[in-house]
Image: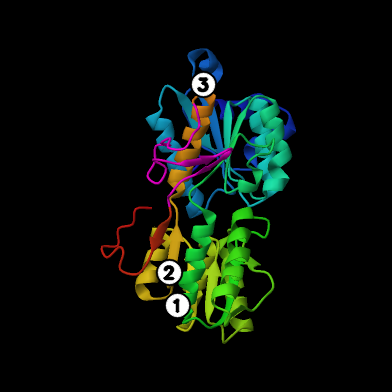
């Protein structure tokens, strides 16, 4: 979901410069809501833009719902919307950030495709007085690029749970393959690399079949092609661990099509995506955090900074899992891990 105030759409029509038209028309899909913010500064309404990795996939559609909910809950205080690139492309994300700088928004909540690639643009935004909060980019915490980075959970706990479930399903031995959204995704690669180290220490009889994980760019077609290639190349594979929703669901779908029952799938996912595969046994375990909560909490954090509120441990960012966050300097951490397993949703009704 992309929610954007009318001003941004009007801006595309009003300016003839090709660069502005390109930024509004080709880097992301947007829709208009809200009021004309021409008078918002004097009315005390803050403009907060959320920039996800990519639009058009389930994960960030749900994040957009959280942004829209925040916008509704803070009606009269903020004009909040989401706009992102139509492919997982750091350059497109930078272009959107540059466009938002030109619009002189008050704050940005950014989920970087490549934290280091977008850091200069985020630093420029802060130099212009724009508050910047990131998500899934803890390496930027404490740099000039951000005011705060917020995470849904302790990444060590999250990755250990994912790889522990993989080992459990594999019976403590065998070979596995990994797939991530991108090799430049800080969190995906941190999960994978530390997870492999966890297996070496705790399950030495489990080994990866490749030096690096496959990447799918958070794209279903690419993830499916990867899954087909993996199963052709490694017919005796025992496990698949996945850092993207597309990777896990498409691996499970291909296993189902081929009626291959000997591969344990442990993955990042969403209840609505993983639920059927878990129930039918094509996915062993999945885990997640609510993307809507990440969007909502990031916007709450940005608004608190704009309003001069103290950011300290114990503050409530307004969404389940973020009722009492831990603050360590510029790093804000919630407790929002959601584990997904067979039998959890017997009525087929999923929360997100």
Q: Does the magenta stretch include residue 311?
A: yes
Q: How is the image coloured?
A: rainbow
The numbered mark, 2 or 3, whose residue comes first in the sequence reads 3
Q: Which numbered marker is on residue 285?
A: 2
Q: In the image, residue 132 lies at what x, y percent?
A: 60, 34
Q: Which residue is drawn at 40% across and 46% down?
A: 321
Give the label, 3 or 1, closer to the camera: 1
| Of 96 and 296, the residue lying toward us | 296
In the rendered structure, which segment of residues is drawn in magenta?
310-336
Q: Does the magenta stretch include residue 130?
A: no
The numbered mark, 3 or 1, whose residue comes first in the sequence reads 3
Q: Which numbered marker is on residue 169?
A: 1
The numbered mark, 2 or 1, whose residue comes first in the sequence reads 1
Tell me, yes or no, whether the two marked residues, 2 and 3, touch with CB atoms within 8 Å: no
Q: Which element type, helix, strand or loop, lies under badge 3? A: loop
The crowding category of the residue bearing disc 1, from other C-alpha atoms within 10 Å (few below 14, some 14 to 19, many at least 20), is many
Q: In the image, residue 230 lies at what x, y percent?
A: 61, 77
Distance from disc 2 to disc 1, alpha carbons, whole Å, reads 8 Å
Q: Is residue 213 placed above or below 231 in the rendered structure?
A: above
Image-based side of 306 in relation to 346, left or right: right
Q: In the rendered image, which residue does mark 3 sit on?
A: 36
| Overall secondary structure of the magenta section | loop
The crowding category of the residue bearing disc 2, from other C-alpha atoms within 10 Å (few below 14, some 14 to 19, many at least 20), is many
Name the image quarter holding residue 98: top right
Q: Which element type, helix, strand or loop, lies under badge 1? A: helix
> Furthest-top residue in view?
42
Q: Which residue is drawn at 62% across and 26% down?
A: 11
Label total for image: 3
Q: Which element type, helix, strand or loop, lies under badge 2? A: strand
Image-based side of 304 in relation to 179, left or right: left
Tell me, yes or no, whether the two marked residues, 2 and 1, touch with CB atoms within 8 Å: yes
């Amino acid at each position: 979901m992309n929610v954007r105030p009318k001003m941004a759409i009007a801006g595309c029509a009003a300016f003839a410069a090709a660069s502005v038209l390109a930024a509004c028309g080709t880097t992301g899909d947007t829709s208009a809501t809200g009021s004309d913010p021409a008078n918002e500064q004097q009315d005390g309404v803050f403009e907060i833009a959320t920039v996800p990795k990519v639009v058009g996939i389930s994960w960030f559609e749900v994040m957009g719902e959280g942004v829209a909910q925040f916008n509704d809950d803070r009606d009269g205080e903020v004009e909040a919307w989401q706009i992102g690139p139509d492919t997982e492309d750091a350059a497109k994300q930078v272009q959107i950030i540059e466009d938002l700088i030109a619009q002189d928004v008050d704050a940005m909540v950014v989920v970087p495709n490549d934290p280091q690639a977008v850091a200069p643009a985020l630093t420029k935004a802060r130099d212009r007085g724009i508050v910047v909060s990131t998500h899934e980019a803890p390496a930027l915490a404490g740099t000039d690029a951000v005011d705060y980075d917020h995470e849904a959970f302790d990444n060590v706990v999250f990755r250990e749970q994912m790889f522990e479930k993989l080992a459990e399903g594999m019976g403590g031995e065998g070979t596995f393959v990994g797939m991530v959204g991108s090799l430049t995704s800080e969190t995906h690669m941190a999960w994978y690399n530390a997870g492999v180290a966890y297996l070496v220490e705790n399950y030495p009889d489990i080994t990866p079949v490749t030096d690096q994980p496959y990447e799918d760019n958070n794209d279903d077609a690419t993830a499916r092609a990867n899954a087909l290639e993996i199963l052709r190349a490694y017919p005796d594979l025992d496990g698949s661990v996945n850092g993207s929703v597309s990777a896990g669901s498409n691996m499970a779908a291909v296993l189902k099509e081929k009626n291959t029952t000997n591969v344990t799938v442990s993955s990042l996912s969403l209840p609505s995506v993983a639920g059927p595969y878990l129930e039918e046994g094509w996915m062993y375990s999945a885990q997640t955090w609510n993307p809507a909560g990440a969007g909502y909490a990031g916007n709450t954090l940005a608004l608190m900074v704009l309003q001069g509120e103290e950011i300290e441990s114990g503050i409530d960012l307004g969404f389940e899992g973020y009722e009492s966050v831990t603050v360590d300097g510029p790093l804000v951490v919630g407790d929002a891990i959601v584990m997904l397993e067979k039998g959890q949703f017997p009525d087929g009704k999923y929360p997100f």
